[in-house]
Image (tube, helix red, strand yellow):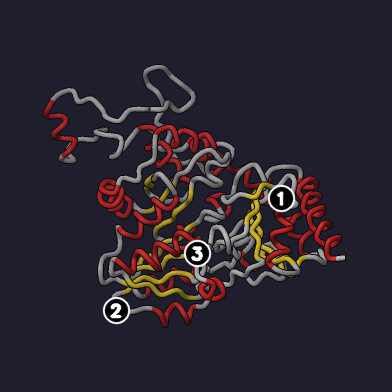
């Protein structure tokens, strides 16, 4: 089995970690759609269960198709290993619970994907795990939140949904000084645009549903890190809680990875033009996109982040009802959660992805009632802009 690393990410996305098919020479990755694996004899089975012999046992514990995806993702994120999960939240929950126990404390960014926030703020509290939510761009606030029982820092950058960006070097320095684990959700960037391990981050999570797959037909998650860290997750919370990825989903994501680089470049090209259009529009109050010069984290684009990504947040001039009318008048852009698909997707965080927040919590996280998040797709950018323009025009006509 080859996990040869090539010089360039584009090549690794196609070739790294390839298991192959020695029996028939298939170019495409085979789908090993099996629940269990046959042993040559009882001793071989016993040796594999004891960890004394390499080999597959049961697909909850490992599968060749899934393994190829894991090896490829480790190559893309410049880590030693990776673990695949049945969903992005499966990856988040398994990764955090493998490193936290009752009586522990973690620090998290004030704004997070709604279900990550609900898991940490609600369920973890029931399990006796304490959390502090801070402005992750403020080093002083992070330092002030650290306690004797603090174990890790969990954050996103750019943050879902308001595109706040954090300095990975700064967070890693703080964490290492206090011997804390760092865990990042890198979904918005993908490894094409940001590789957090290069800045000292320990564990990198993706909702593989999004850019990694890229076609809106899979729900899955990935966590990348050291062999020691990934084995800890695989042999505890992944094995025993069971949020494992199916071979078929692994195959679809591996196929999606082959075009990841070219897709992400097109997403970025389109998003930059859409962001410029929105930023100049009289009907738009604010635009949050790191690629715009006035964004507080614009200096990170071209350094930590190769480009600004394909997701934009913006606020309509007007009320919540105006935001709803605007979205309901779109004709091509789909009202749907998720991101990274070929189609342009638009959603209202306060009532959709971030509805687990209370009104007060949303305000503290910078998620207003008129904030809209758009995942810019692969359509021709003029068609995307024309659709947004006609929906905004409807607002102006009604206002008049």
Of residue 16 and residue 184, the one placed in the foreground of this image is: 184
Q: Residue 108 is drawn in which quadrant? A: bottom left
209 left or right, relative to 143: right
Q: Position of residue 87 (x, y in %)?
A: 43, 47
Q: Residue 24 is drawn in which quadrant? A: top left
Disc nearest the viewer among 1 and 3: 3
187 left or right, relative to 150: right
Q: Read off the residue under disc 1.
A: 269
In which quadrant is the N terminus drawn? top left
At x 28% / y 40%, what residue is drawn? 61
Q: Read off the residue under disc 2.
A: 148
Residue 304 seen from this side: no
Q: Are marks 1 and 3 in contact (CB under 8 Å)?
A: no
Of residue 392 and residue 310, the one placed in the foreground of this image is: 392
Q: Earlier in the sequence, mark 1 or mark 3?
A: 3
Say what secondary structure mark 3 lies in.
loop
Neighbours of disc 1 within 10 Å: few (<14), some (14-19), many (20+): some
Q: Are marks 1 and 2 in contact (CB under 8 Å)?
A: no
Neighbours of disc 3 within 10 Å: few (<14), some (14-19), many (20+): many
Disc nearest the viewer among 3 and 2: 3
At x 29% / y 64%, what residue is drawn? 100
């Amino acid at each position: 089995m080859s996990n040869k690393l090539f010089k360039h990410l584009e090549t690794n996305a196609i070739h790294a970690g390839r298991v192959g098919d020695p029996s028939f020479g298939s170019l495409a990755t085979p789908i090993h759609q099996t629940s269990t694996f046959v042993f040559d004899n009882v001793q071989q089975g016993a040796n594999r269960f004891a960890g004394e012999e390499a080999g597959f046992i049961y697909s909850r514990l490992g599968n060749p198709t899934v393994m190829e995806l894991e090896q490829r993702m480790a190559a893309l994120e410049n880590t030693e290993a990776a673990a695949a999960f049945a969903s992005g939240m499966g990856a988040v929950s398994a990764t955090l619970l493998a490193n936290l126990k009752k009586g522990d404390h973690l620090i998290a960014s004030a704004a997070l994907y709604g279900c990550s926030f609900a898991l940490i703020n609600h369920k973890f509290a029931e399990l006796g795990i304490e959390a502090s939510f801070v402005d992750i761009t403020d080093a002083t606030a992070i330092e002030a939140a650290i306690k004797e029982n603090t174990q890790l820092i969990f954050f996103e950058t750019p943050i879902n949904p308001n595109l706040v960006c954090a300095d990975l070097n700064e967070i890693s320095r703080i964490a290492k000084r206090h011997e804390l684990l760092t865990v990042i959700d890198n979904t918005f960037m993908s490894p094409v645009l940001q590789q957090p391990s290069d800045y000292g981050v320990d564990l990198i999570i993706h909702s593989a549903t999004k850019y990694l797959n890229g076609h809106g037909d899979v729900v899955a998650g990935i966590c990348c890190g050291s062999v020691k860290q990934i084995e800890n997750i695989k042999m505890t919370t992944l094995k025993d809680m069971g949020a494992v990825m199916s071979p078929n989903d692994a195959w679809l994501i591996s196929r999606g990875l082959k075009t990841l680089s070219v897709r992400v470049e097109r997403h970025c090209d389109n998003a930059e033009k859409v962001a410029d259009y929105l930023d100049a529009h009289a009907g738009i109050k604010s635009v949050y996109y790191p690629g715009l010069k006035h964004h507080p984290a614009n200096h990170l684009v071209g350094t930590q982040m190769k480009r600004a990504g394909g997701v934009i947040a913006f606020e309509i001039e007007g009320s919540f009802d105006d935001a709803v009318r605007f979205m309901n008048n779109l004709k091509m852009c789909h009202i749907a959660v998720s991101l990274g698909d070929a189609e342009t997707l638009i959603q209202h965080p306060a009532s959709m992805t971030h509805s687990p927040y209370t009104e007060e919590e949303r305000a503290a996280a910078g998620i207003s009632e008129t904030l809209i998040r758009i995942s810019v797709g692969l359509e021709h950018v003029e068609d995307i802009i024309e659709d947004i323009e006609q929906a905004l025009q409807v607002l102006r006509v009604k206002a008049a």
